[in-house]
Amino acid sequence: MKLRKSLMAGILGLGASGAALAIAALATPALAPTAIGQTPPDHPGAGVYQKTCAMCHDNPGGTRAAALSAIKQMTPARLREVLGPQGIMGPMAASLNDTQKTDLIAWLTAGQAVSSAQWTDALACKADKRAVSASASVVTNGFGVDADQTRSLSAAQAGLSKAQLSNLEVAWTIAFPGQGAGTGASVLSDGTIFVTGGQKLIAIDAASGCVKWSYAANSRNTPSIGEIGGKKVVALSVGQTIHVVDAATGAVVWKASGQPVDGSGGQVRGGVIFAKDKVIVPLSASGVASGMNPRTECCSGHGSVVALNAADGTHAWEYHTMPEPTYNGQVNSLGVKQKGPSGAPIWSVPVYDAKRNTILVTTGENTSHPGTDTSDAVIALNADTGAVVWKYQAMAADVWNMSCDVATGNNGPNCPVLFGGDGRDYDFGAGAIVTSVNGKDVVLAGQKSGHAWALDANTGAVLWSHRVGEGTALGGVHWGIAASGNTVLIPINDPVLSADPKFKSEAGVYAFDIASGRPVWSYKAEPNCAGQRGKDVAACTTKYGFSAAPIVVDGAMVGATLGGEVIILDTVDGRILNRLDTTGTRTVLNKDVVGKGGSIESHGISAGAGMIFINSGYGSFGQTPGNVLIAYRPKS
């Protein structure tokens, strides 16, 4: 798979939570239980790596490719998955035969200690501490925290006050083998938390960190809690299959395909939700990676939503952001015909608007021509049928795929910009919020362009918008926003990706009044690279923004940075209440696994049961890998 330099540069220009999750999927970091050993220089896998991978992965600085050190921490099973025909790196590995893939994986994983599939046994609760209360209420549910995805908790719900957040200590830390730092937590009132990490779904006792039960599940979704037949259940995606398990025991209730019946396919990047009597599955097929191969008839794949009946997993309905592609009349410089439309994937977590009985999804960019009115959009679907109720396109003509390097103009033959349009990779990686202010129902959304949007929940009409800076392909707004009372909180990532002297990072947090759109306050992020942090944090001086989705507890915003800091701000005026450093080697409960903190990304921040939970470590995009879940509690 010897790709020309311009195409490999396309990897380095990969976008974020929308298209950029392609590299994120390959680069999801995982710390091996022991240090990576030295491999023989004449190992055949080393040659495969040099020919097919080194151009990008040996040059992670200022790019969005994963460093070789991060890839070497992945398990053989995970590498085999992403290099396979349906894997994210499938298009780049298409010319490798099975022997070459085996050699590459063997070289990458040489020196790793083998982690037991039953690694949670060392953390098992005592028999009398494993119960999950049947009467426990749901405190924090899935990525959105509450039904409207505001990611906000009162002091009573969280068991924490704003004052207590100023004085926190580590309660316990768990190290995940084989999959990085895991996901956010869903929390029950009895102190049970549900997380995924280390290729398992785990029920943890919040007070002690011991494991009540575990279920084998290689998933990157924050688990979602629902109810079937009066019994609490937990749902998540594992590959293309949706798993629903008993919240009390981890026993399987049902498993079903989360794919469209037309076979168009796709992966779940954000997470599933329960909506009344349905499980809603957002899918992110787009062709964003396959476009890198200049011999590909670019592109195929598009976003869709599949609704399954919650009772048994049977198919209820599906929605597609566009029809299947056809030849569009364009031919690339190698004479390969182009296809379209494609793209508008759904990378984010949907939200169910119960008042209007609609499912709200946000979408990514198109990946080939013609552009559609469903890309870079907020779309409301009827929850019973999947029919479109309204849609708002925030940015038209954003047609982009991984063969593009728009910043330098060094574009591969399948880059859609060569055929027209204005590809910027400014999709929505963050899900929408539903809220009400002054009797007006509002949908809030944040975009990688740096835009904050407020839409009429009934019609999708724009109420107001603000743009913070110019945005970047990694955000602007990357993974999510939060709302607290009448204020919406907009985290801005804006990593410094190039030496362009005109680029001005607006990394920080920006608060707006929901009713009027008026700016309320702002907090400008700055790199913190003093002492050991400057050594522990990759690209410390350029990657320090707020990329992970924040959470609000009792009027305090808990945010986190690519530099591995947790920064707690008062939502009234933006003043700092506390800051915590999660980087470096950590003392963990399961001592047979080495624990290390790093960048905080994605769904990395959760709260409940009187604690804050932080997943620290994220090696994608040249950031700092790690593998720990840290629980913080108020100091006594």
Image: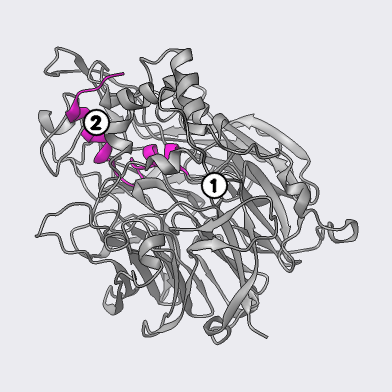
Residue drawn where x is 52% and y is 51% of the image: 357
- Identity, as a three-letter code, of the amino acid under mark 1: Leu
- Identity, as a three-letter code, of the amino acid under mark 2: Met
- SS at badge 2: helix
Are the residues tagged 2 and 1 within 8 Å (C-beta)?
A: no
How packed mark 1 is, by other alpha carbons closer than 10 Å (few <14, some 14-19, many 20 or more), is: many
Which contiguous range is marked in magenta? 1-28
Which sits in the foreground, 317 or 232?
232
- 25 inside magenta stretch: yes
Q: Is residue 550 visible?
A: yes
Q: From this view, report whether residue 332 is shown above or below residue 285.
A: above
Left or right, residue 284 beside residue 134: left
- Residue with the mark numbered 1: 31
Callout count: 2
Q: Is residue 246 visible?
A: no
Kindly report which numbered mark, 2 or 1, lies closer to the viewer in this rendering: 1
- Residue with the mark numbered 2: 8
Image position, residue 317 (x, y; %):
53, 33
Image position, residue 321 (x, y; %):
36, 35
Name the quadrant containing residue 545.
bottom left
Q: Earlier in the sequence, mark 2 or mark 1?
A: 2
* Mark pair 2, 1: CA separation: 27 Å
Residue drawn where x is 53% and y is 32% of the image: 110
Locate the C terminus and report the quarter of the image it occupies: bottom right
